[in-house]
Image (cartoon, rainbow, N blue to C red):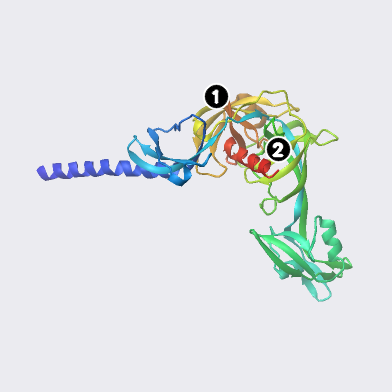
């Protein structure tokens, strides 16, 4: 009996020792390594278990440098160290939440290889592009060292029937590939067997507008090629006014989409950057007479009720209720899981549909992020990105002039 009691006590002690380790590992992997803080504020985390932030003394060489990031030690129950995080000071950021649908017209920086076809020659069928080593998703930037910006110009160069020295961007590396066209007995011309795309168009939603700079952020995810899934490099582009006629309702296994048309003869802005955090550019004027509100920092977002602004009919955004059910600080872009709870939106669209990407998410009077993706298995749920992550891209664009 005494032996059993000792084993039970030993097991209990072991469990008590393991639990803190498990919790420390959980929060070390869950919490981000960097935070923004407004001047005079202290870091407060909305976690289930209490976590405090204890300042770490800076190195002597950094003391005299203004705006140098500081460091804090994140501690469970104020005692158990989890990790050291970087703190960057920032001012209050005021943004106008939008929610208006907008049209997207993009010209690529080069051309993207999106597929291959056979060329039937006197010797038989072949595909010169595939044989040369071209791969789907490659960006062709130049032919014979001359920049090329359209599929028409590429076809014209191939029609000469001479070897073509292609400058190709693949996985961040630049390659030189020689492609020799083949003469098609069927079409009586020189062909490469390569299908390329040089532009794209679509509909998305504006997330925010910054009154001081005229900059906007939208979508919350990049524009990618529908065939290859690769991010499209932007050469130039326009933002256009759009009127939404209705929506194809989303169903499990089949995402819906907004249906609309470009409704103005002139663009409303220019596109400047297609980034993993969204589409960014400059609007010629504010999209609506809406007051600016503070942008929330990621640690200020909490689980629970929020609202989104989205245009699902006409050209004016409406407010719909959602629930934030999960927050992921470590993901680059899939930072929040949201669930549509608004009966009117569920009736109109079934939940989140294509074209709603970029719809601003508001909580406690602050802009906290944007809708990005729908769950294919359940259109009432989807992902959102932190507004903080999108605004970092806007800042980098402004810094580049």
| Towards the viewer: 5 or 398 | 398
Residue 362, percent from left and from top: 59, 28
Find numbered disc 1 in the image and state the secondary structure of the residue it sits on: loop
Q: Which label number is shown at residue 204?
A: 2
Residue 179 occupies quadrant: bottom right
Residue 75 visible in rendering: yes
Please tell me in which quadrant of the rendered image residue 146 appears. bottom right
Local secondary structure at mark 2? strand
Q: Is residue 103 above or below residue 182?
A: above
Which quarter of the picture shows residue 170? bottom right
Nearer mark to the viewer, of 1 and 2: 1
Callout count: 2
- Measured as percent of width and height from the top left, residue 119 is found at 80, 67
Q: What residue is rendered at 70% in x and 68% in y?
A: 133
Q: Nearer the viewer, residue 51 or 377?
A: 51
Q: Position of residue 284 (x, y in %)?
A: 78, 33
State the quadrant of the N terminus: top left
Numbered tag placed on residue 364 in the rendering: 1
Q: Give above or below for 331 relative to 160.
A: above
Q: Are marks 1 and 2 in contact (CB under 8 Å)?
A: no
Nearest the camera: 113 or 210?
A: 210
């Amino acid at each position: 009996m005494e032996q059993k009691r000792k084993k039970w006590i030993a097991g209990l002690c072991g469990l008590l020792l393991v639990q803190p380790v498990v919790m420390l590992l959980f929060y070390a992997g869950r919490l981000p390594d960097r935070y923004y803080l407004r001047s005079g504020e202290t870091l407060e985390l909305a976690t289930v278990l209490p976590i405090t932030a204890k300042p770490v003394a800076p190195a002597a060489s950094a003391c005299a440098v203004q705006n140098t990031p500081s460091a804090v030690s994140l501690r469970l129950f104020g005692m158990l160290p989890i990790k050291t995080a970087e703190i960057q000071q920032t001012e209050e950021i005021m943004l106008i939440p939008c929610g208006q649908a907008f049209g997207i017209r993009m010209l690529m920086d080069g051309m993207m290889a999106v597929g291959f076809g056979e060329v039937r020659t006197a010797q038989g069928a072949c595909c010169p592009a595939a044989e040369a080593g071209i791969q789907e998703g490659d960006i062709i930037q130049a032919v014979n060292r001359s920049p090329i910006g359209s599929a028409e110009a590429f076809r014209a160069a191939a029609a000469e029937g001479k070897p073509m020295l292609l400058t190709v961007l693949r996985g961040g590396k630049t390659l030189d590939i020689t492609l020799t066209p083949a003469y098609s007995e069927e079409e009586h011309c020189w062909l490469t067997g390569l299908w390329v795309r040089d532009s794209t168009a679509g509909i998305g939603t504006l997330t925010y507008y910054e009154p001081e700079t005229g900059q906007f952020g939208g979508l919350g995810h990049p524009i990618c090629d529908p065939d290859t899934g690769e991010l499209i490099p932007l050469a130039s582009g326009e933002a256009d006014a759009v009127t939404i006629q209705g929506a194809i309702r989303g169903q499990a296994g089949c995402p819906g989409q907004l249906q609309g048309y470009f409704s103005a003869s002139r663009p409303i802005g220019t596109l400047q950057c297609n980034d993993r955090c969204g589409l960014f550019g400059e609007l010629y004027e504010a999209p609506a007479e809406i007051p600016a509100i503070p942008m929330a920092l990621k640690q200020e977002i909490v689980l629970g009720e929020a609202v989104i602004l989205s245009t699902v009919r006409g050209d004016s955004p409406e407010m719909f209720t959602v629930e934030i059910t999960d927050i992921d600080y470590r993901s680059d872009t899939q930072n929040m899981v949201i669930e549509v709870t608004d009966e009117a939106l569920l009736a109109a669209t079934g939940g989140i549909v294509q074209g709603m990407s970029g719809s601003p998410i508001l909580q406690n009077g602050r802009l906290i992020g944007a809708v990005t993706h729908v769950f294919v298995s359940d259109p009432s749920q989807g992902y959102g990105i932190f507004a903080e992550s999108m605004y970092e891209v806007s800042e980098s664009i402004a810094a580049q002039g």
